[in-house]
Amino acid sequence: MSSSSAPCYICTMCLHPCPSLFTSTPSLIQLTRCSSCGSVVDEYVEHEPLLVVVDALIQRPKVFRHVVFNRYANRRIGAKEVIKYLASVSLLEGYLSYQASPTSLTSGDFWLHCSH
């Protein structure tokens, strides 16, 4: 990562730019602390993808910052992939909200209302 095209990460708490997400030695990998706020730059680096999706469903801002800025920082990713991810999470969130709604229609009621 010593080249001029080295990725720049951001702190998911304060959005301050950081040069790395973790430092490693032969016996230890340590998450980097933000020089601005003192918190871990991106705690989602060590989380399983399923936990990232769950946090996205409950709409934690830090997880979206992780996905958009830090997850693919060392790879070329286009806006298309980010938009697909955010659209998928939004659709799933909408579906879950609809299902949890006390006034949600059953499938039979839906067709009755559409046929009028």
Image: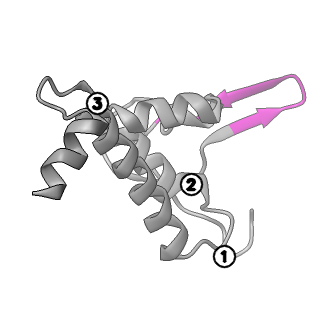
Front tag of 3 and 2: 3
Of marks 3 and 2, which one's residue comes earlier in the chain? 2
Mark number displayed over residue 84: none
Q: Residue at x 87, y 22 (%)?
A: 27
Tell me which secondary structure the magenta stretch mostly adopts: strand
The image's colour scheme reads one colour
Q: Residue at x 61, y 29 (%)?
A: 47
**Label 2, label 1: how far apart the Cα atoms are:** 12 Å
Residue 106 among those drawn in magenta: no
In the depicted view, which residue is nearer to us: 98 or 73? 98
Q: Which span is picked out in magenta?
A: 23-33
Q: Residues within 10 Å of mark 1 (few under 14, many from 20)?
A: few
**Label 1, label 3: how far apart the Cα atoms are:** 46 Å
Q: Quadrant of residue 2?
A: bottom right
Look at label 2 and name its amino acid: Pro
Of marks 2 and 1, which one's residue comes earlier in the chain? 1
Look at label 1 and name its amino acid: Ser
Left or right of residue 54: residue 47: right
Mark number displayed over residue 5: 1
**Label 3, label 2: how far apart the Cα atoms are:** 43 Å
**Mark 1, secondary structure of its residue:** loop
Query: Picture coordinates of residue 4 (x, y %)?
Result: 67, 77
Look at label 3 and name its amino acid: Gln
Q: Is residue 18 visible?
A: no
Which quadrant: the C terminus?
bottom left
Q: Which residue is mark 2?
A: 19
**Mark 2, secondary structure of its residue:** loop
Q: Which residue is mark 3?
A: 99
Q: Residue at x 50, y 37 (%)?
A: 53
- Do tag 2 and tag 1 residues touch (Cβ < 8 Å)? no
Q: Residues within 10 Å of mark 3 (few under 14, many from 20)?
A: few
